[in-house]
Image (cartoon, rainbow, N blue to C red):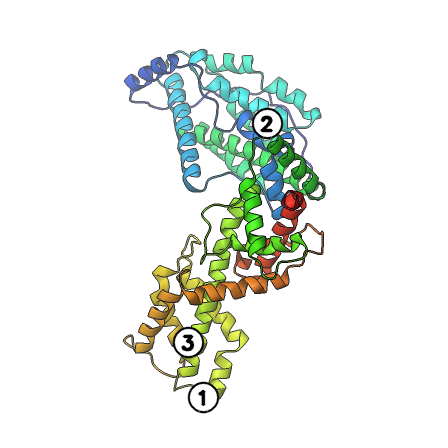
Amino acid sequence: KKRSACRVKKHRSRSLPNIVFSSLKHSSSLISSVAKCAPPPLPPVNIQSLREIDLAEILKNPQLRHDILFDPQLQFRPNLDGERGRRKKITYDKYWAGVRDEIESYYISKLPFVESASRLPNLFTTLKDILVSLLPSRDKPAVQEILDIDLILQQLSQHSLDLIGLASWLSTIFKSHCAPMRDSWVDEMMTLFYEADAESSVVKLVEGLRLIFTILEAMKLDVANHQIRMLRPVLVQTAVNFEKDYFAQMISRCKLEITDSLNWFKRCYDNMSPQPQMPRDAIVPSVLSLLSCSNMVSEFPSSLAFDHARLIVLRANVRQVVCLQLCLVLYKQLVAQSTSNSNTDKAKLTSEANLEVLRKEVLAIITDDNGNVKWTRNIGAIALQLVRRSSPNSTIDPKDMRIDFAFNWLIKQTQPSSSVYSLMEQRFFKTISQQISLDSEDLTIKAGATNSEDHDDISGIAARISLLTKFHWSVFGSYYTD
């Protein structure tokens, strides 16, 4: 549904809410302390913070362009995960708490509006700048007229700024240009401003202001994600030449040393028996050697700098597959040794359908609520489940010796130092190698191969390793063969 932008209606001006504020001492100390600090802070969402997802920045960011090649579903989103996300939330909360205290000081404690010490001029200027950067040319005159900063500051000093009218205009702008899925946020924003006015609530007023910037950030993210979707075919097509040129410049300017990478490839090539006639045939075994847990490397080659995080994930995926296969080996042994199972039972219990169910059950045991996988701490539960599933016709006593046997076997064999683990890992690498063909120059990867549910799937892992090795050889093959 097309929505047209409109101007703020000329009606009775609503001032900021008047509510009781008990701590006048706190208010005056706040203003005096703020006045000593210059300049006042920008909102956490500002032109500079959003610049990293400008199209120009995307096009010259080599790591991002590299990641786009490997993840067809790559999207920008607010980074609220982990320690960085925690620090970001603290920064946001601190800024908006300062805005709340300042509004209470000016409009409740009746302290004078000090423009040079106030966060509000930067807040409205940043709002204007972001809107101008996001909206089409036809809407920019209205932004310049309605977000007249000098007039807004004058109205702030006179306690006459019409925030309901401003929010209503922003609502129209947002619903005209945001994705429909953002409409609920826009409605919530308007509700907060109406309730702030009706209840004289500074808290709800600030929540409304904060939500405005959340919506602005979402608008910028939506634009960037749309641009990536549209540009991805071109970025994939030009990826090899772009990275060849990038790394050639880095090496020629002595900003990247790849001696370690050349030594890594030569060592892997020399250790192959028989040695391949074409050096290119050594790239898959060389990359697979980096994914081993039984012979784990402490560092990855510098030529794979853009893939370090990807290699860590792949190595964890390989370990998960190997451990799952070890569980299935033990399970089949338990089924065969169970005296309560007939030949028909044994055939049914070891069918592909039953093995797939068991694999999912083991994955459910080792995966916590946050998606983290822990093998060692869950060995006891795995052992009990394997014994139960191997003898469905008998009651399992918790003291059953088979549980202890399964526990001890898994504790030992799921360690990468185990010879059985190493053997299973090498068998897996051989399977992967057989699935990867370097004949094709196609630098594409199916979307499903990047989904979390495929991370323990052999074909999904093979697809990701295949793309990585093909692309890496296309960029660095000439260095390895010179």
The quadrant the C terminus occupies is top right
Please name the amino acid that badge 2 sits on: Trp
Task: Tell me what residue is drawn at x 50 percent, y 22 percent.
Answer: 123
Secondary structure beneath disc 1? loop
Q: Nearer the viewer, residue 52 or 467?
A: 467
Give the position of the N terminus as an image quadrant: top right
Q: Which mark is residue 342?
A: 1
Taking the image as drawn, is residue 408 in sight? Answer: yes
- Classed neighbour count for the residue bearing mark 1: other residues with Cα under 10 Å, few (<14), some (14–19), many (≥20): few
Which type of secondary structure does the marked residue at label 3 adopt? Answer: helix
Q: Residues within 10 Å of mark 2 (few under 14, many from 20)?
A: some
Q: Secondary structure at mark 2?
A: helix
User: Which residue is disc 3 drawn over?
Assistant: 389
- Residue ID for mark 2: 169
Sequence-wise, the earlier of marks 3 and 1 is 1
Q: Nearer the viewer, residue 148 or 131?
A: 131
